[in-house]
Structure formats: structure tokens, C-alpha cells
Amino acid sequence: MAERYKFEVSKDSLMQRIRLFNASQNGELKDSIFNIDKNSPYFYEGYIYDNKNGERYLVLIPSPSESDTELLLISVISREDQVIVVNHEPENKEKIRVRKTVIKNF
């Protein structure tokens, strides 16, 4: 159920672009490192920061990638540390609306 985006670049190039974007958001590369996901060795896990809205998006990048590289939006953490999960089936209309808003903002 993750929201998926495809890019015609290598996974390394995509991760580097995200690091540079994050550095432009917070002035440093801290917490911009992608690491192999603890729960699955098939994904690199990292964050994309949105300082304007005070949010950080948890994303995964599959480690074995083909010609296109996928970016999977998993969840967002708000300024108030509220976690909104995108990676599951919404249970009601309110959660559907919130999920759509998160995806739109991303």
C-alpha cells in the first residue's frame, strides 16, 4: 500500500539528490543517510524533510533496482511527532482523506 514513485536514475543518484535536498532544508546532511532497513535487507530506509510544513517523510528505496528506481512513501511524522501511516489500507473516510493529503503534500 505504499505510495510508489519511479525515477529514471540509479538508486545511488536518487539517494544523493535526497541528501542534497535535505541539506537545503536543514543546512546539514545529518539524518540524511540511507541505511539498509532493519526489518528488511531489501530496502534502504531514509527521510525526506519538509521544513516549511515541519514534516519528515519516511521513504524506502528497494536495494535491488532495475533500470528505474522506485521510491516508496511509507509515512509522515508531523511537527507534533504524530505519525500518519501511508503504507496500509485506510479504515475509514477520514483516514482516506488524511492519506490523500499526505500524498498531495509530498
Image (cartoon, rainbow, N blue to C red):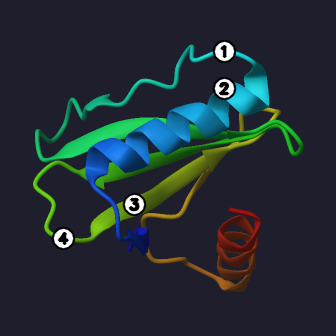
Kind of residue at badge 1: Glu
Q: Quick check: 48 above or below 31?
A: below
* Residue closer to the observer: 10 or 70: 10
Residue 98, horizontal then vertical, whole percent: 73, 70
Alpha carbon of mark 4 to alpha carbon of mark 2: how far?
27 Å
Asked if labels 1 and 2 touch by Cβ distance under 8 angstroms, the answer is yes
* Few, some or many residues within 10 Å of mark 2 (<14, 14–19, 20+): some
Report helix, strand or loop for mark 3: strand
- Whether tag 4 and tag 3 are in contact, CB under 8 A, the answer is no
Q: Earlier in the sequence, mark 4 or mark 1?
A: 1
Q: Amino acid at mark 4?
A: Ser
Relative image position of residue 39 (x, y in whole percent):
19, 37
Query: Is disc 3 surrounded by few (<14), some (14 to 19) or many (20+) residues within 10 Å?
Result: many
User: Which label belongs to residue 28?
Assistant: 1
Q: Earlier in the sequence, mark 1 or mark 3?
A: 1
Circle 3 sits on which residue? Answer: 71
